[in-house]
Image (tube, grey):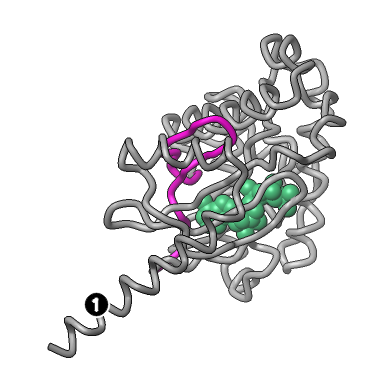
Amino acid sequence: MQELIEEHQKQEKDKVKRKIFKDVFDDRTEKALQAIERRDNFDYIIGPISKGKEANLFVAKAKNKFVAVKIYRIETTYFHRRNDYVNDEKLLQISKNPIKKIYAWTEREYLNLKLCYENGIKVPKPIDQEKNVLIMELIGQKGEPHPTLKYDKEVKKNINKIYKQYIKNMNKMLYTTKLVHADLSEYNMIFFKDKLYFIDMGQAVGTNYKKARDFVNRDIKTIVKFFNKNGLKTTIEKIKKDIKKYKD
Ligand code: ATP
Ligand code: MN
């Protein structure tokens, strides 16, 4: 009996949560969530994870599991200044329509994740995408997102493992998937259960893009600082050499 009561109370709480979060989304986002719900990849929002420059992240329930929901904000203005990143012909053509541009950006993050995932790079498994909403695997336990390297207290202890997997992921990303992350820092990596995940792939571009080399150099420079700060002495040259010579 007690169990039944608890279950009922939980359901009531879930309903309330569902209502709270339902009211904060604009119509387009709400419709996108409903479409994803019909495909069984979303039930309801549990709570917020973060509010970034252009997207909000949530933990949600989908059937019997937890997922991460990334919602690109439609009203965002920052977004329209990011033409610099857009290398894709299709994205450029439709960039005059700001809403379609956000949809295309979301789709690109979904496809980038898919490409990486299929090539064995550790990224959250992409599950679904509709308009400005992306559903992916939640990296973490029991509905709790694991912190990124920036906020992870176990980083120093695991720094050698993190380095090895960083090199492996980079090799596969540059040479197999032929993508450059273009915003890779300790804020966009998660070390969970002995595996290093790359996240936040919306801005990733093909290695044939004219600025790709600059982006790779910038990403590596950022990460050298991170490793040196956490007790693993390295240099840009050493990292580049290690990435090239990495064999599975
Ligand atoms: P920012 O603008 O701050 O770079 P963003 O809006 O581009 O962020 P993300 O970096 O993709 O969005 O996600 C924001 C935060 O949400 C991440 O820093 C991470 O803490 C968390 N997060 C994102 N995806 C996942 C995931 N799949 N599993 C667990 N946590 C996640
Ligand atoms: Mn990020």
For label 1, the residue is: 7
Of residue 172 and residue 132, the one placed in the foreground of this image is 132
Instruction: Give the residue type at disc 1.
Output: Glu
Q: Quadrant of the C terminus?
A: top left
The location of residue 4, given as percent across then percent down, is 17, 81
Q: Is residue 163 visible?
A: no
Asked if residue 128 lies in the magenta stretch, the reply is yes
Q: Is residue 8 above or below residue 75?
A: below
* Residue under the point 48% across and 46% down: 124
Of residue 178 and residue 69, the one placed in the foreground of this image is 69
Residue 78 horizontal side relative to residue 227, left or right? right
Q: Is residue 54 visible?
A: yes
User: What is the chief secondary structure element of the magenta stretch?
Assistant: strand
Of residue 57 and residue 201, the one placed in the foreground of this image is 57
Query: Regarding mark 1 in the picture, which secondary structure is present there?
Result: helix
Q: Is residue 38 above or below residue 137?
A: above
The location of residue 86, given as percent across then percent down, is 76, 22
Which residues are drawn in magenta?
123-141
Residue 39 horizontal side relative to residue 85, left or right? left
The location of residue 106, given as percent across then percent down, is 60, 32
Q: Quadrant of the N terminus?
A: bottom left
Q: Which quadrant would residue 219 be assigned to in this image?
A: top right
Outermost residue, left side: 1
Q: Which quadrant would residue 191 be assigned to in this image?
A: bottom right
Q: Is residue 198 above or below residue 10?
A: above
Asked if residue 247 lies in the magenta stretch, the reply is no
* Residue under the point 53% across and 24% down: 176
Numbered circles on residues, count: 1
